[in-house]
Amino acid sequence: MTPFAPYCSVCFAPLDEPISGAQVAVFASVAAAAPSVALQPQPTAASFPPRSAPMYAPPTGPIPRGVPRPVVNVLASAPSPTYARKVWATTGVAVGLGALLQLALFQHGRDGGVAPAKLITYSLLATAALYLLVLVAVVFRAWSVEHALAPHWSIGSRLGSVVLGASAGVILAGVLILILKATTGEAVTDDGVSLLVGERDPARTLLAVLVIVVGAPIVEELLFRGLLLEGLRDRGKKVAVGASAAAFSVWHLQPAQFRYYAVLGALLGLLYLKRGLVASMSAHAAFNGLLVVVAIAVAAGPPRTVEANGVTLAAPGQWKLSDPDASDAELDGVDLALDGPSGAGLVIQHEEVPLSMQLTPELLLVQLRTTGGFFSGLTVKLASARVEELSVGRAVRLDVSADGQGGQLIVLPLGTRVWTIVLLDSGSQRARADFAQMLPTLRLPRARAHP
């Protein structure tokens, strides 16, 4: 029996012939001539360090044109419940600050210490400061040491995201404008925007554009999409989009338009999930921008004829009927009521007098100077009373004020009716200039003449 089995010592394949004694002698001489190597213990699985998951390595060279950019997981790990609460807390603080600002401005305007036209300018400056404060809070929360949150800036081509977002914003705003124009005859969809740019003051218009078209899209998208929606993404897209849309609607503090802002916030949220913040910001800016352009065009457009209860006049574009239901206005004793720039208002009404009472502007002027006159809610400056010739007849004209607003009062006797025309200008130079242009176009219904 040979001392070696007929198998290969490397692969254990069977050999055709057993190894002979001469072959053993040759193998032994070769082994003796080879240098000795110390045998090492065979490594085991425990000898190797645990392997980690492969890390993402960004490309070092430029990405060829046409090749989509890689999308990185924006969260190192799923947000903890504590972090989700902090996201909600940051959003709540931002909404609360906005509500406090609105309340302070409302109370300040109610006190009558500042003319509404100036108050609107102050509100724009305060809103700009609020946006800056919210931006700092969002950045602090998003990049806090405890849990870094990085929103999607762009998914796919950045230029494509901008074009897609801007197109979506313009289309959505255009559809809303067309629907409103067809149903109400008004092209302005947001009274707030019209109020901000209706004065046609270059400095205030520029400030309004910066706040509405630049500040609002950047800060609101970072807050409601980049922070809130992204922080709730692990709870499902429906929950994240719905919660961010609801918070976005509450932020605007207009309960009557809650659904409008909620739908708009949901659309922006879906766009963010599809193409990132660049797309949602572009859509938001384009949407607001088109509304501002339309509001400026309407304010600077040609006058249009407005009519109620037989009273007609040519009013500039930013003036509109306060109450489109003429029957309600007639029941309240108001024939025509208009809202103008910066909160200015124009009211025209009449009172029937006996046919035997022959009132003239000169007689009215004497009575006013003798008795002092009384007009509900108005403080009359009797020293300013004078008789003027208007296109509709001779009338008494006075300077008045109400709740800190300046204005003018015109008393016009025509037959058996005494017409009163009241302008409260809210401190608006534009309203005063418009009033001077509207008076020559005023037409009043005929009344019975004195015998």
Image (cartoon, rainbow, N blue to C red):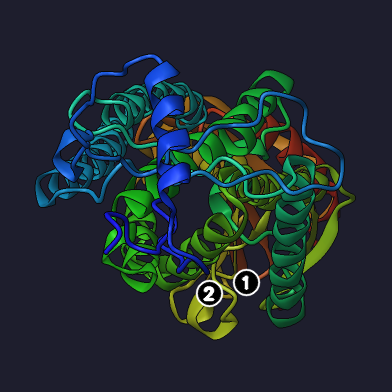
Q: In this view of the protein, which residue sits in the foreground, 329 or 118?
A: 118
Where is residue 88 shown, x and y percent of the image? 20, 48
User: In what element is the residue under mark 1?
Assistant: loop
Where is residue 120 shown, x and y percent of the image? 48, 31
Q: Is residue 347 visible?
A: no
Q: Is residue 22 left or right of residue 170?
A: left
Q: Which residue reaches farthest top? A: 35
Q: Is residue 20 visible?
A: yes
The quadrant holding residue 45 is top left
The quadrant holding residue 112 is top left
Q: Which residue reaches farthest bottom? A: 327
Where is residue 353 shown, x and y percent of the image? 53, 70
N-terminal-most mark, 1 or 2? 2
Query: What amino acid is at disc 1?
Result: Thr
Q: In this view of the protein, which residue sits in the foreground, 266 or 20?
A: 20
**Which residue lies at the image location 29% right of the left edge and 40% below the top edge?**
51
Q: Which residue reaches farthest left? A: 82
Task: Establish if 76 lies above or below 165.
Answer: above
Give the Cα distance between marks 1 and 2. 6 Å
**Which residue lies at the image location 39% right of the left edge and 68% below the top edge?**
237
**Which residue lies at the image location 77% right of the left edge and 45% below the top edge?**
293
User: In what element is the residue under mark 2?
Assistant: loop
Q: Tags 1 and 2 in contact by the CB under 8 Å rule?
A: yes
Task: Establish if 134 lies above or below 69.
Answer: above
Q: Residues within 10 Å of mark 2 (few under 14, many from 20)?
A: few
Where is residue 146 shown, x and y percent of the image? 17, 29
Residue behind mark 2? 354
Q: Quadrant of the N terminus?
A: bottom left
Residue behind mark 1? 416
Q: Residues within 10 Å of mark 1 (few under 14, many from 20)?
A: many
Q: Is residue 219 left or right of residue 298?
A: left
